[in-house]
Amino acid sequence: MRTLHPDFRQVRATLLDHRVDVVLAREPFPTDGLRVTALYEEPQGLVVPAFHRLAGRTSVTLDDFADEALVRYADAAYDAFWRLDPRPDGRPAPGGPLVVSAVDKLELVAGGQALALAPAGGEHNPLRHDLTTIPVAGIEPCRVVVASRAEDRGPLVADFLAIAVHQLTGPRQLRRTAVPPATDQAPNVVSAVRMIQALVPRMRERGWGRVVNVGSRAATTPLPNMVEYSAAKAAVVNMTTSLAQHLAGSGITANTVSPGVIVTDGMRRMFEDGAAARGWPGQWTELEPLVVAEYAPNPTGRLGTAEDIAAVVAFLVSPLAGYINGINLRVDGGIASVP
């Protein structure tokens, strides 16, 4: 059995070209010539930057973001569904930037250029440390279906469809989607493990080396709206401390650097663009103290920068840090109220 991962634009073509026999997909997508079997429904979530004004909410309604741009899609039916266009009152949805891939969508949202609707129980929850997904109440859920060629009645396809319906419908699936898959483990933990496995053997040969993993303040002060991310970063810290013990006597040290809230160009633009609506000044030098006070209060009175993190990493990888090993070094301005 082979597995492919077509996007919504490729579902019909992939089936009709006989590249695959069945596709598990979310509607809407073109269904001419296909047999479609509904499996279950997933609620929609609003994907926002981690420092968006709604990011701390446990749920939102359409009224909370009705005037904000959502990313657009080239396919008319797909675009209408995922942008709620037109809105229930008949108004058109605000325009937004056009996306051609999932990566484009994430970058546009992270950069503060638009928001996006996505399945709250899917791969978007959580996406990465600079994004978060908030459940949206009062709008139509998306439907997950299994599709096959309408004329294909072979026994293998029939058996697959029967198993899919049995395994993915009813109360079992409701329990399955209530807790999203641990998608944050891969980019935050597994990727670090793979890098260590690839590079540490050569460090052992040389009798010297430095491992610096990137954690987060969420490792010690978990964020309520980023549960999986917080757990993943805690795992990074624990793994690194264990690695330092494992590498005893090798000349290699292993430490974690845990940033706090780091200002990016996208974050700065997002707050500058929304400043007028909140009665805030538009210049970042005047705006930053207000952002710090509301979103990231810390004793330094400012947000961190990439240079702050780089300076600490440069120190830890230098010979000057040879006696520092197995620690979690917080570079967060004191925002994490832990020793």
Image (cartoon, rainbow, N blue to C red):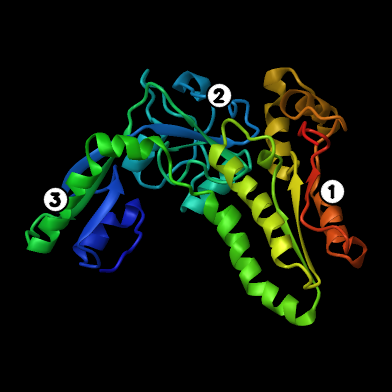
Say if mark 2 contacts mark 3, CB within 8 Å.
Answer: no
Image quarter of the C terminus: top right
Mark 2 vs 3, N-terminal side? 2
Residue 5 vs residue 263: left or right?
left
The residues bearing labels 1 and 3 have C-alpha atoms spaced at a distance of 56 Å
According to the picture, the residue beneath numbered tag 2 turns out to be 57
According to the picture, the residue beneath numbered tag 3 turns out to be 162
Q: Position of residue 262 (x, y in %)?
A: 75, 42
| Residue at position x 84%, y 59% in the image | 316
Crowd band around label 3 with a 10 angstrom C-alpha radius: few (<14), some (14–19), many (20+): few
Image quarter of the N terminus: bottom left
Of residues 9 and 56, the one nearer the viewer is 56
Please tell me whether mark 1 or mark 3 is closer to you in this view: 3
According to the picture, the residue beneath numbered tag 1 turns out to be 308
Crowd band around label 2 with a 10 angstrom C-alpha radius: few (<14), some (14–19), many (20+): few
Crowd band around label 1 with a 10 angstrom C-alpha radius: few (<14), some (14–19), many (20+): some
**Vertical position of residue 337 compared to residue 197: above or below:** above
Please tell me whether mark 2 or mark 3 is closer to you in this view: 3
Which mark is drawn over residue 114? none
In the rendered structure, which amino acid carries the disc numbered 1?
Answer: Asp
The residues bearing labels 2 and 3 have C-alpha atoms spaced at a distance of 39 Å
